[in-house]
Image: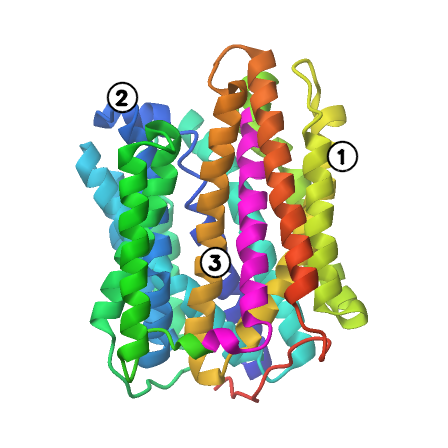
Amino acid sequence: MRTDSRRWWALGFIALAQFMVIMDTSIIGVALPKMQSDLGFTPDGLSWVFNAYVVAFGGLLLLGGRLSDLLGARRMFGAGWVITLGGSVVAALAGNAGTELTGRVLQGAGAALIAPSALTLLMVLFGGRPKELTKALALYGAAAPAGGTAGVFLGGVITEWLSWPWIFWLYVPISLIAIAATPALMPATPARRGAVDVAGAAAVTAGLALTVFAIVRAPEQGWGSAATLGALAGGIVLLGIFLAIQRSRRVPLVRLGIFRTPNLGAANLAQLLLGAAWIPMWYFLNLYLQQVLGYGAFASGAALLPMTLLIVILMVGVAPRLIARFGSKALIVAGLWALAAGLVWLSFVRPTGSFVVDVLPASLVAALGQALAFIPSLGMAISSAKPEEGGLASGIVNTAYQIGSALGLAAMTAVALSSGAGELGNAVALTDGFSAAFLGAAALAVLGGFLALATVRTARRDPAPKQEVSSH
């Protein structure tokens, strides 16, 4: 296979990895009621089918990035698929709640190795080709919303015509193909000398996991409850311990000086707030379609396809040209504010609304904003770092987006519930709650735009990759 052809085939598998990682957060939603009855989950415990994955994924991303730098990105990419395969089999065969959650944790751990190593491999393949790099990042970025929508759509299809274990069996052949293809398609990346900061990894993983645990439980426990405040305090203490360890170690898990790299911190902040605004929009729009407009799972997933199609077209065909013409900063700011405009428009949804009037135009404006902001902020975050810290930079930006998503969704869930979204069957109250969540998410997007305007430097239009890296 020619080298150029192999690079693009490899990019296809990298995009597939992103697609599957994001799809895993959405595909189980429709199946939850059936899983509850089959596996004996309590109403409160059922949410952990989703949360167990998010906590493991978000908590282990920095460690995954560091291992990618030390042991080689290709090796960690393959290892991540092996763990994902094992977790999927455990989750599919589970006969009780505990086993199911174990499988979900393993899937999250596998994703925490796949995501940062995939971005590192992308930079190795395309880092020395600026024009191709922008296109590659666009294809990679488009895989995320496609995976989220496909998860809802496929989850509905599988639950309606098969059974919930097939949601997890779906990952088995894909994992096997990825494991087999990795040695042939992915570029070799050298292992580097250095020790794994075990204490730092334990502290940051536990700190992030405990913080995410507190956030996702807060809508049920109460934001001012002793359980929420105690978990948040414990997470903050552990993260403080992690920072102290990093300052004292000669070879830390995270070189804190990396955050002084121009634009790296600003780009990660943009990604954090982008996730905090986008994920609640997608979540509550799906609930509005099902709980207010009466759409089934299949129809709801299909209704999100126009938004996904627009994002793919814009990210792949339009965003790279706009970045070249206007620069990353302009697109990040404009994208976040366009997302905010779409969210404000969605806040006018009606209890007796329709998809064509209340959902489609506003969701397309929001999709436009997501497509414009995602690629330049992602590219800036990973290309600003030193080549030998590519895995770390990838782990940081993935962590920023995932933690932002968890924070935003938890906060907007609290807003929605306090505004009436907990009254199932009451279309007026549900719509009021969803509208409040859309407005809250819009505020986060507006904030993100102002912060990007203030913090992103424009001395160079776009951070060019620092090295030419062979793809052999």
Residue density around tag 2, few if under 14, some if 14–19, many if 20 or more, within 10 Å:
few
Q: Where is residue 320 in the image (x, y as percent from the top left)?
A: 72, 66
Q: Nearer the viewer, mark 1 or mark 2?
A: 1
Residue density around tag 3, few if under 14, some if 14–19, many if 20 or more, within 10 Å:
many
Q: Nearer the viewer, mark 3 or mark 2?
A: 3
Q: Is 306 on the left-hand or right-hand side of 472?
A: right
In the image, residue 321 sits, relative to residue 298, either above or below, namely below
Specify the farthest residue to the top.
426
In the image, residue 197 sits, relative to residue 152, either above or below, namely below
Residue drawn at x 43%, y 62% is 115
Which residue carries the number 3 mark?
400
Residue density around tag 1, few if under 14, some if 14–19, many if 20 or more, within 10 Å:
some
The residue range painted magenta reads: 258-287
Give the residue type that dot 1 points to.
Pro
Distance between mark 1 and mark 2 Cα atoms? 38 Å
Front residue of 315/70: it is 70
First in residue order: circle 3 vs circle 2: 2
Main secondary structure type of the part rendered in magenta: helix
Which residue carries the number 2 mark?
37
Q: Is 58 on the left-hand or right-hand side of 148?
A: left
Distance between mark 3 and mark 2 Cα atoms? 35 Å
Q: Is 43 on the left-hand or right-hand side of 354?
A: left
Q: Where is residue 452 in the image (x, y as percent from the top left)?
A: 66, 61
Say which element carries label 2.
helix
Which residue carries the number 1 mark?
361
